[in-house]
Image: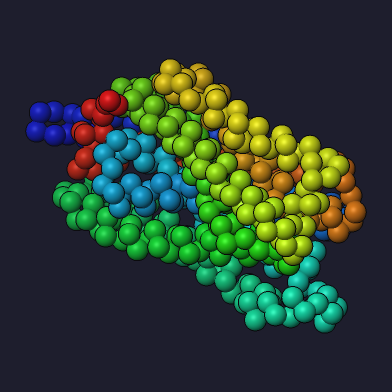
Amino acid sequence: MSAHDRHGPLVRHEQVHIADDSPWKKAPLLFGAIGVAGLAIGFAFKGNDPAKFYSSYLTAIMWGLAFGLGGLWFTLVQHAVRAGWSIVVRRIAENLMLTLPVVALLALPALIFGAHDLFHWTHAEALAHDEVLQAKEPYLNEGAFRTRAFVYIGLWSLLALAFYTWSTKQDTAADPAPYAHRMRYWSTIGILVFAMTLTFGAFDWLMSLDPHWFSTIFGVYYFAGCVSIVASTIALTTILLHRSGYLRGVVTTEHFHDLGKMMFAFSVFWGYIGFSQFFLIWYASIPEETFWFSYRGHGDWLTLSLILIFTRFALPFVGLMSRKIKRNPRTLGFWAVWIIVAEFLDMYWLVQPSLAHSRNAEHIRPDLFDIATWAGVAGILLAVFTWGLGRHALVPLRDPRLEESLNHENF
């Protein structure tokens, strides 16, 4: 079925529906096989070094979650502000948020069975001799930690499935207006829920790897990465769909330009938050706060820290500044891949030094666990994402503002 207005069809069926014989329809099986194989290899060799395995696994999980959380944020905020330009790319974000229930559930083995290997505060002997951990024990205890994890996963999954269901049902509804009103109403509540759960999820799953250290803007730091990666993934997916013959004339240069602006803006925002976090801690020079940066400033970790500044901020800042680059699918696609890879480096920089510091290791040695867990999480993520792309139309066909999005222009 095509989307119609009173003058005729807005989009043709073949523009927005992936054909049954398309390679996109086979992608879920391929990616699923890669994902299962990667996780199977990782878990099979886990016994050789459980702490390293769970450290690598958490790195991959937090990177994978960024796609789904970014997709959820994108969907909620577009409904809340009644954005018109984004309608034609919103379904891609909805398919990204559809990965949340699966990827979030993949986190449970690390958070439950690997907690003792990952989190120093779970050790009874450490708690008995550490006044800081004793003061934080009402919050940082395994029972509360696991309960909060289930709450985060449950709320993210509920929001993602609800908005995905309403959006796809709107495609065939006789009257799309009630669905539009429902999604707009719940989006404002959803944004509040999202903000709280993402912030405390980042505190629990990343910041508590170093339980003595704290930063009140750490959740915002992780959020900036989520938005950068979702804008990059939407742009990259659209470019690939264009090459396969889909969304041509639907997603235009104007939409690429806006996605490029979002990639640029949140790369700058990431740099701003990262620098703010570092500068205030450096200026205060309180030992409990500075050590987190201290052991990221020695050996190979210093090299990675410097690389991250350039790959995650400086180079995208220069590379995405030009209007021509944002409006060119080839150059925009290059920077989209760049940011996605740089976000993984960021997660590696957040997670891995904690284990290295506990072992007095200043050298970075990527190993089988890093590769297997990344392939496993990426494979499962892409399997769910591509399955969603092929299941429904690639755009919300009955959204009341679809025509506005199709005719969108930058000024």
Q: Is residue 64 visible?
A: no
Residue 101 in the image, given as x and y percentages of width and height: 52, 57
Name the quadrant of the C terminus: top left
**Would you place residue 121 above or below residue 185 in this image?**
below
| Residue 40 located left or right of residue 361 | left
Q: Is residue 344 visible?
A: yes
Residue at position x 23%, y 52% in the image: 180
Name the quadrant of the N terminus: top left
Residue at position x 83%, y 75% in the image: 126
**Would you place residue 12 above or below residue 52 in this image?**
above
Residue at position x 89%, y 56% in the image: 359
**Would you place residue 40 above or below residue 310 in this image?**
below
Residue 281 in the image, given as x and y percentages of width and height: 67, 56
| Residue 282 located left or right of residue 359 | left
**Would you place residue 360 above or below residue 135 in this image?**
above
Taking depth in this image into account, of 114 and 320 the one nearest to the observer is 320
Residue 231 in the image, given as x and y percentages of width and height: 46, 37
Residue extending furthest front? Answer: 283
| Residue 340 located left or right of residue 190 | right
Res 390 → quadrant: top left
Residue at position x 48%, y 33% in the image: 264
Residue 195 in the image, given as x and y percentages of width and height: 46, 60
Taking depth in this image into account, of 162 and 55 the one nearest to the observer is 55
| Residue 296 located left or right of residue 106 | right
Number of numbered tags placed on the structure image = 0
Taking depth in this image into account, of 81 and 66 the one nearest to the observer is 81
How is colour applied across the structure in the image? rainbow
